[in-house]
Structure formats: C-alpha cells, structure tokens
Amino acid sequence: MAYTSTTVTGNREDLKQLATVIAATSAPVCGLLPTRKITNKRPVVLMDALAAPSVAGHIEGNATNTGVDKFSGVGEYTGQAQRLVREWKVTKEQQAHDSAVIADVSNASEKALKELMRDKETVVCGDQGKTSDIPGATAGVTAGLGNITDSANTDFAAAYRTPAASIYSGAKASFDDNAFNAVLASMFGQGGEFMDLHLVAGTGLRSHIVEQFTRSAGSASQVDYNMNGTAVIPYTVEMYDSDFGQVKIINGNPACMPSVDRGYVIDPRYVEWGEIFGEGSEEYPTDGSGRVGACDLYGTTLSQGPNGLGKIKFSDEA
C-alpha cells in the first residue's frame, strides 16, 4: 500500500505550487487554461449559443405568450480523464555522493514533476482523440486541442464544432495578415463578442509571423524597422493587433507541440482543464536500495465550445 511521506520535500500541496511556476515557463498552454475540480472520470460539459439575429417585426394583435424553448439546442461533450505518472528513485549511493548534481529526494521529485508537466502539456496540445479507459486493461486518454478543434469532430454537436473557416490549413508560405484575420473573423462571427485571445505558436510559426507579416516601416513589404537607414531595430512580436481585437502571442514549448508550425488560437472561456486530483508526489516502501516514489496527476481537457477556438495547421506542416 502506497503512503504519502511527510519527509519528502515537495508533498502534494508543495508540488501544486511548484507546478504553477513550471506551467508559466515550460507548459504555457496548461498555465493559460482555467482549472476546475471534477469528480467524474467522464464529466459532461454543456454548451449553448444564441439564436441567429432576426429582423422580423411584430404584428399588432399577435400573442406573445406562446413561449420559445431557449435550451432546445444545448450541446453536450463528455470528457475522458487521463492519469499521467512519472516515477522517481534515489539510491542510497547517490544520496551519499557530493557532486554538482544533488541527487536527493527533493530534487528527484522536482525533476519528475517537470517531466510530468511537459507530459500534460503534450497531451493538451496533441492531435489524439479520447480513448475510454477499461480498468486493468486500457488507459484512458484525454483529447488534445488538435482533435477538439477538428471541424469534423463528431464528439461535438454540429453547431459547436470549430468552423472550417476558423482553421487555417493552407501552405505556410501563404499564411499572412489576411489569412490570420480570416481565422479571427470566423471566430468573432461565432458570438460577436469581445474576445480575450491568445495564439500559442510553435517556434516555426512564430518565426514566420515575425519575418513575413506586414509592419509599417516605410513600405508594405518592409520586414524590419529601420533607423535612419543606418541600423535595424530587432523586432519581437508579443501582440498582434487584428481587425477583431488584440491577440497575445505565446511561445509554445517545442517539445510539447505536435509541430513547430502548429498554432492554437485560444479564448480561455471555451477550454479548460478538469482536475480530479492535481500534481502530487508519493513515496513508496522500498527494499533498502534507496527511496522511490512517483509524481502523478489525473484530469481531462474540457471544452465549452470548440466553435470559439481557432487553429493553424499548415498543409505542409513541418
């Protein structure tokens, strides 16, 4: 029977705080998504949308007490929780050595947590669909953003799937300001509301935006800012000012993205992480060779409406 050791520096509560710090640097998508507590390994999320605008006038004398069901079009999505585990071990000999690498329980647990957070980020950013778990036989797999934003994903009702227009799927060389604005226009058209958007961009996509997107520096084709024709000012893109509001650009962890060219346009209102239990570490009884344990977490990606999300997946994706 496993037990939680109070001697481990980095118990479940401490690791939770450390995971927040790691998420901000190594797992930017996980750090961006809201987290809420769930108690079901297959939680159901409800989605709703406003009716299309109408210009029909009211005929004098007609009744207005017939009623209209405002929730007839509510959609459902059932998630699938996935448990991720990273084991750690420190031998008695490692603990006895004094070297540049401090091999103790605290550092072993922290290193395992960093690996675990990258595993979580990879799952969240992946193209995999969900797989139902079969206890003792099949591990549950949660769907990644690549699958959630698939316009043909039948896990979502047709009205709530990511529209094809919200997905750029052309060649990388053709992805420019107009193409990106078309994606944002489609997203804006789903609700017509102010959007708090973040573009999580792989390193290849980020470089393409910096090198190819238009910037006002004397001509439409000018790439860099020039200073009196004598020097070039280095240019870093942190924000994209579109026709539909500003988009914050975040570097995706290249070890966790499906491709260096992949990008997800995320409004945190429409996707979150459902947590059954958060990041923690347990130490187990050993045979005397050292101390062993594992870091783990258990949860699932959930979306309140993929129609509010966008994606960049080039046809020639690297």
Image (tube, rainbow, N blue to C red):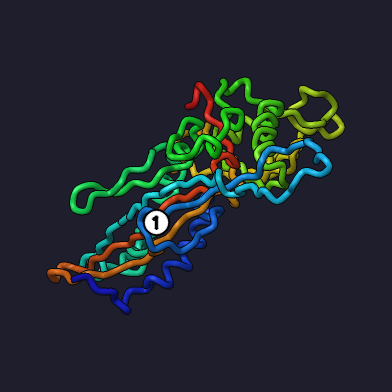
Q: Is residue 48 visible?
A: yes
Determine which quarter of the picture holds residue 282.
Answer: bottom left
Task: Characterize the local packing of mark 1: few (<14), some (14-19) or many (20 or more) Cα atoms within 10 angstroms.
Answer: many
* Residue 262 relative to residue 101: left or right: right
Picture coordinates of residue 206, whole percent (x, y): 60, 36
Q: Quadrant of the N terminus?
A: bottom left
Q: Residue 177, position in %: x, y? A: 71, 28
| Residue found at x 38% / y 47% | 142
Instruction: Relative to 237, say whether 40 is above or below.
Output: below
The structure residue drawn at horizontal position 37% and vertical position 66%, both measured from the top left corner, is 280
Depth check: give the residue in front, 246 or 281.
246
Percent x, y of residue 181:
70, 31
- The residue furthest front is 61
Residue 106, quarter of the rendered image: bottom left
Residue at coordinates 73% horizontally, 38% vertically from top-left?
53
User: Can residue 115 be seen in the rendering of this structure?
Assistant: no
The residue at the far bottom in this view is 6
x, y percentage for residue 151?
A: 51, 31
Residue at the left extreme, as displayed: 287
| Label 1: element kind | strand
Can you identify the residue that label 1 sits on? 299
- Asked whether 46 or 176 is in front, the reply is 46
Q: Can you say whether 69 is above or below 240 in the image?
A: below
Q: Is residue 265 left or right of residue 225?
A: left
Q: Is residue 6 left or right of residue 168?
A: left
Q: Amino acid at mark 1?
A: Gly
Q: Residue at x 58, y 37 (%)?
A: 310
